[in-house]
């Protein structure tokens, strides 16, 4: 349902809050499942994008696995009911306690990011009498063409190990007794809108895959991470990303061997568009060549604009006419607490409901209590009248 139709219901609620359109989430998940059906593809939802239990239950019910990056994310995934054999655990800095938690719960695999971590995993597995499984996260040195803070697959990024290091480490890898090498893992970045970057990734994977096969490693799993971008400029007309082109590309470009499964770790593309941050105009204030529209939501509820200069479509749900120029800002004592500068909005007044769109991913999870603000609640479409 278009958000403008909900304006009067939103007016009755205390703002700000995160609104989730469960129907859109379901449609998005169905679209993914339609495109992977009949292919040896498996999608693990990147839990870090949104850990809201209500969303996790929907995602689990549609058969997705969980990609976690902390012990607490693994715990949340297990609590919600993701099967342990569909949980993977990634991250450059897993503590011993977190590794032990994953081992105790016999999760499917660890995505290991350094040789030192691999040795620690092997030791801990041995001391706990467990046989664990791991995928090596490799750094393919591919530029994802996205914001530098969310680029992860270049040589100077902290993630994964280089192809040269893998070649040198093969003798060590062959010796480990308590953990089994089951796959290779990659993730080149997030909010990738140039799909050809994934082709660059596939070419690199094919090379290292051939090399490892020639060395005698038969790896049942290849994991290409996540990163598919969403349309922040026009969420109304493109609520569901083009999954077809995305999955077709991997089918075409990546050389899978028989019996292998291709894993994906999609976060933003599954949940990004189903969320909106709903706020109210507190004040109008004239500024230099602009007007400040001061909202009751700020960088504490949506950090992305302040952190990455990210754009979110701003929509006044209470009015449509008389466009005027605004800087849409939050109430926090920081100049970076601004959502949009010099944008056109219908002439807006105190009390109007403003939606900041596409906040299903990396908004609620990145919220903070800076300025001792309250944590904003969530409202779900199917709980409204
Ligand atoms: N797999 C790994 C290993 C990752 O590091 C990530 C995201 C994903 C999967 C999921 O990527 P996605 O499909 O969501 O692009 N806070 C930033 C995004 C950080 C992404 C971190 N890693 C933002 O607000 O844009």
Image (cartoon, rainbow, N blue to C red):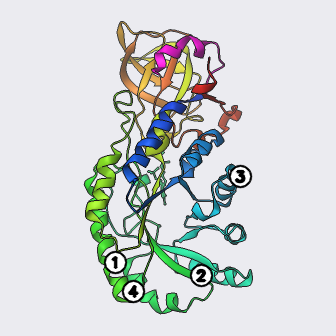
Secondary element at tag 4: helix
Verify CB contact (< 8 Å) between mark 1 and mark 4.
Answer: no
User: What's the mark number on residue 179?
Assistant: 2
Magenta segment: does it hold 7? yes
Magenta segment: does it hold 206? no
User: What's the mark number on residue 79?
Assistant: 3
Return the residue at label 1: 208
Secondary element at tag 2: strand
Classify mark 3 as within 8 Å of ligand 1 or not, answering yes or no. Answer: no
Q: Nearer the viewer, mark 2 or mark 4?
A: 2
Q: x%, y% of residue 146?
A: 35, 51
User: What's the mark number on residue 167?
Assistant: 4
Secondary element at tag 3: helix
**Location of residue 228 with respect to 225 vertically, above or below:** above
Classify mark 4 as within 8 Å of ligand 1 or not, answering yes or no. Answer: no
Q: x%, y% of residue 372?
A: 71, 34
Verify CB contact (< 8 Å) between mark 3 and mark 2.
Answer: no
Verify CB contact (< 8 Å) between mark 4 and mark 3.
Answer: no
Residue neighbourhood size for the residue with mark 3, other residues' Cα within 10 Å, grouped as few (<14), some (14–19), many (≥20): few
Residue appearing at x 38%, y 41% in the figure: 230
Q: Nearer the viewer, mark 4 or mark 3?
A: 3
Residue neighbourhood size for the residue with mark 4, other residues' Cα within 10 Å, grouped as few (<14), some (14–19), many (≥20): some
Residue appearing at x 30%, y 60% in the figure: 251
Q: Is residue 112 visible?
A: yes
Q: Which residues are magenta?
A: 1-17
Q: x%, y% of residue 225?
A: 44, 60
């Amino acid at each position: 349902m278009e958000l403008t139709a909900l304006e009067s219901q939103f007016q009755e609620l205390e703002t700000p809050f995160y609104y989730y359109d469960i129907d859109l989430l379901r449609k998005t998940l169905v679209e993914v499942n339609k495109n992977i059906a009949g292919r040896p593809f498996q999608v693990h939802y990147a839990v870090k994008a949104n850990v809201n239990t209500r969303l996790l239950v929907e995602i689990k019910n549609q058969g997705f696995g969980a990609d976690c990056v902390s012990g607490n994310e693994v715990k949340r995934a297990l609590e919600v009911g993701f099967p342990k054999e569909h949980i993977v655990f990634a991250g450059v800095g897993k503590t011993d306690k977190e590794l032990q938690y994953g081992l105790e719960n016999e999760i499917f695999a660890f995505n290991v990011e350094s040789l030192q971590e691999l040795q620690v995993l092997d030791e801990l597995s041995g001391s706990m009498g467990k046989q664990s499984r791991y995928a090596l996260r490799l750094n393919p040195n591919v530029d994802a063409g996205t914001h530098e803070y969310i680029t992860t697959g270049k040589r100077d990024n902290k993630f994964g190990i280089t192809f040269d290091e893998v070649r040198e480490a093969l003798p060590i890898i062959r010796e480990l007794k308590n953990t089994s090498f089951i796959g290779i893992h990659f993730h080149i970045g997030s909010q990738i809108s140039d799909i050809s970057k994934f082709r660059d990734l596939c070419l690199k994977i094919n090379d290292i895959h051939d090399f490892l096969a020639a060395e005698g490693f038969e790896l049942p799993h290849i994991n290409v991470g996540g990163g598919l971008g969403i349309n922040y400029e026009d969420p109304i007309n493109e609520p569901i990303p083009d999954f077809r082109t995305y999955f077709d590309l991997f089918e075409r470009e990546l050389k899978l061997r028989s019996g292998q499964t291709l894993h994906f770790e999609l976060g933003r593309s599954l949940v990004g568009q189903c969320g909106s941050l709903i706020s109210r105009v507190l004040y109008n204030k004239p500024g230099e060549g602009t007007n400040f529209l001061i909202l009751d939501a700020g960088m504490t509820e949506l950090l992305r604009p302040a952190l990455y200069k990210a754009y979110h479509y701003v929509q006044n749900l209470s009015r449509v006419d008389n466009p005027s120029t605004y800087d849409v800002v939050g109430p926090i004592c920081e100049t970076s607490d601004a959502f949009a500068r010099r944008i056109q909005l219908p002439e807006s007044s105190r009390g109007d409901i403003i939606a900041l769109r596409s906040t299903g991913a990396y908004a609620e999870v990145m919220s903070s209590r800076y300025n001792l603000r309250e944590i904003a609640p969530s409202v779900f479409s199917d709980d409204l009248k």
